[in-house]
Amino acid sequence: MASLTLKGIPPAVLEQLRKVAQEERRSLNQQAILLLERALVTPRVSFAEAYPAFVKRAGPSPLETSDLENLRAQDDELDVVQ
């Protein structure tokens, strides 16, 4: 089985991972693998798909159209995984 070393984990993230692993009675490694598996199984949703669903749930946005266009442009440029 392959291994992976993670560097530069923020202390707060590591502490939270330790806490959850302890609560779930898993090793730190087992918990990290479980969370990675869950994250990779979750379908990716683009801003263009997520925003209409958000508006339907939460109502109209207080943002201006230009603000939203800028967000969409950033989403496309960065190829953000959500």
Image: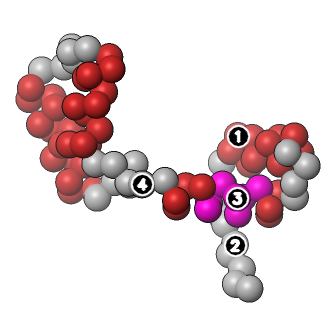
Name the outermost residue toward the left.
Answer: 66
Give the Cα separation between the discs numbered 2 and 4: 25 Å
**Which numbered circle lies on residue 34?**
3
- How many numbered discs sit on the rendered protein? 4
Residue picked out by circle 1: 12
Across and down, in percent, residue 41 comes to 52, 59
Q: Which residue is located at x 87 percent, y 54 percent?
A: 26
Q: Which amino acid does label 1 sit on?
A: Ala
- Would you say 56 lies left or right of 42 here? left
Q: Which residue is located at x 77 percent, y 56 percent?
A: 31
Across and down, in percent, residue 9 comes to 66, 54
- Give yes or no for residue 32 being in the magenta stretch: yes
**Which numbered circle lies on residue 43?**
4
**Which numbered circle lies on residue 5?**
2
Give the Cα separation between the discs numbered 1 and 4: 26 Å
Residue 41 seen in the figure: yes
